[in-house]
Image: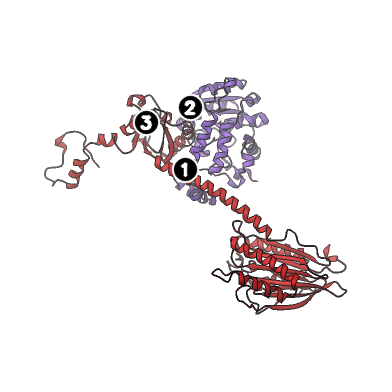
Amino acid sequence: MMCRTDGDQDSGPDPEEPPDDAQAFSALLEDSIEDLYENAPCGYLSTSLDGQIAKVNTTLLNWLGYKRTDLVGRRKFCDLLTVGGRLYHETHFAPLLRMQGEISGIALELEAADGSRLPVLVTSTVKTDSDGQPLLIRTTIFDARDRRAYEHELLRTRQEAERERERLQQLATTLQKTLLPPALENVPGLDVAAYYHIASIDEVGGDFYDLFPLAAGTWGLFLGDVCGKGAEAAAVTSLARYTLRAAAVYDPDPTAVLSNLNTVLNHEYNGTDPRFCTVIFGLLTPDGDQGGFRITLASGGHPPALLLRADGTADYLPTPGGQLIGVLPDADIATITFRLDPGDTLFLHTDGLTEAHTAAIGGERYGDEALLDFVRALAPATAQGAITTVRDLLDTFGTGVDDDTAVLAVHVPRADREEQQ
Amino acid sequence: MDVRSRNHVRVSGRPGGPVVMLAHGFGCDQNLWRLVVPALEREFTVVLFDHVGAGRSDLSAWSEDRYSSMDGYVDDVLEICRELDLGPVTFVGHSVSATMGVLAAARHPEYFAGLVLLAPSPCFIDDPAAGYRGGFSAEDIEELLQSLDANYLGWSGAMAPVIMGNPDRPELGQELTNSFCATDPDIARVFARVTFLSDNRTDLEQVTVPTLVAQCSSDAIAPPEVGAFVHARIRGSRLITLNATGHCPQLSAPEETAQAIAAFAGRLR
């Protein structure tokens, strides 16, 4: 846009052309470029390439409380900065301006004549001559007091949020640990192993398992999955765990144990916030001289267990018809009874494993079929061998495992214990 | 660990010529040398690199443990020398890298034909008891760290994924404003502490290789008395004061800077 700052009437618009209304309106309101520069709503500063102040507008002088003669030809731009800002200017601002020819929106603080500080946003461009040689640096300075206060607040809340998140993660990890046995009991004649995969360190998952002694050489075990995540799910997990253990002491029949759990959960959460879980409960009774166990599993809506036999075959142990625990006043419980002979391994899992997304099959869920194939290739296996291999499998899924996963394996070692080597 | 990609090492210039190795300081990367490189390439083999954490170095190689003291950077410089195996180099260290050059040459003088210390400062903090004036107080450095924070508010949200996720596509980084010298704020904070809080005054006396101290005529970061101090402590060193102003003579006066480097390095042959 062409602007006139002098009173030369002769250089006005061509009289033969109709006067431009918009131009006339503009000229009426903003008739002095000088005033536009001096009293602009931002600070203007022009310096030589080494920062020596050559021209400064009234707005900036007023902000800083300097007289023009204090600055022009006497001070450098970086003299107006705080010491920390000067370091930033010399190590970041000035080199970038040299290399790019411009730099914008840099947050700095100016020091006023009275020592007070003014947070500003600074933008500079290098003016070049017709050969492209740099001549001088033009700088605009915006008052950023409000903005800086807002940014400080943002930074402070972000730091606070980061601290909170750390605290929460620690809490979640601690809580998670209290929901699992610190170590599995050492069962005579059995080799047991378990693994808990935490999908998110921000939230407590709802998977749980345990293995514990009951009367007369028998053992109880369970593995389950509470619907949902977080503190509320953790409360249900905790309730489910101690109810299962208490119920098993009272009446170790697996169907009775799960029925009792169903009653407790159903009573506890029959209001507006139903809580339920899937769970497999097992009763292990030593059977015969060969070292095997007779096992009865009861399932309430839980994915079926797998049996890896000593001969290298493997199959699901179907428990169809078992219903979710806690939803209905009387849930149907499905059971299956079988022998775990020397060399056999019982494998329990939660659906975090089969529901995991796998990169290998294009993000599809892993699925029951794939798991069966996997354990068929694995069998026969020790408890620790099975758990380690499944753990490696989970690792290959990476972030594809979006739910917590618990796995528990129970294995009867052969008499010669050859495989233990 | 591939040293060349870790430090984004680039070798150019006259093959077989005397070797000049240019080390950038805090705040930027090897881009800082781009105005002096063409002048040096005619006569010298020129080695450029980024400190780990800066420029296009391998950010995965950065650890707070290694890079929160001068030693990590010095180890890198020595490893680059060993890896390239170009014989003794003239090491040109700007600002904090001048100190790294001093430490490297003290440990392995056989790697170095000479040192050019450009706008050096072995200690930025004043030490009134010893009558040393580095120009800054510890509080000033805290203020710098705040300046860094104030200007990196948007980093973690917007810039980091673009730059860090595409190390093989530098043009993505360059599209971002002010991104030539973009650095992860956590890394920048650690490097700022190393740069401004280290005190390596006593190490100067360990230098035995020919040394040129080149200071600027007006430098807000490394005042003239600091250059004189460095010169006095390194036996046999030469001190020159460039006409260049500011802390980055390789940008404000590239020709003068290149000439000073070339004249010194050329004589060492």
Describe the colour scheme in one phrase. Answer: by chain
Occupied quadrant, residue B186? top right
Q: Residue at x 45, y 42 (%)?
A: B178
Q: Secondary structure at mark 1?
A: helix
The chain letter for the residue carrying disc 1 is: A
Q: Are the numbered discs 2 and 3 placed on the same chain, yes or no?
A: no
Q: Are marks 1 and 3 in contact (CB under 8 Å)?
A: no
Q: Are the numbered discs 1 and 2 placed on the same chain, yes or no?
A: no
Amino acid at circle 2: Asp
Amino acid at circle 3: Leu
Graded by Cα atoms within 10 Å as few (under 14), some (14 to 19) or many (20 or more), the crowding at tag 3 reads: some
Instruction: Classify A31 as above or below A175.
Output: above
Q: Nearer the viewer, residue B179 or A226?
A: A226
Q: Secondary structure at mark 3?
A: helix
Chain coloured purple: B
Is residue B53 visible in the rendered image? The answer is: yes
Q: Residue at x 76, y 62 (%)?
A: A184
Residue B219, which numbered label?
A: 2
Q: Are the numbered discs 1 and 3 placed on the same chain, yes or no?
A: yes
Chain coloured red: A
The chain letter for the residue carrying disc 2 is: B
| Horizontal relation, residue A26 to residue A141: left or right | left
Q: Secondary structure at mark 2?
A: loop
Occupied quadrant, residue B83? top right
Residue A152, which numbered label?
A: 1
Residue picked out by circle 3: A64
Sequence-first disc among 1 and 3 = 3
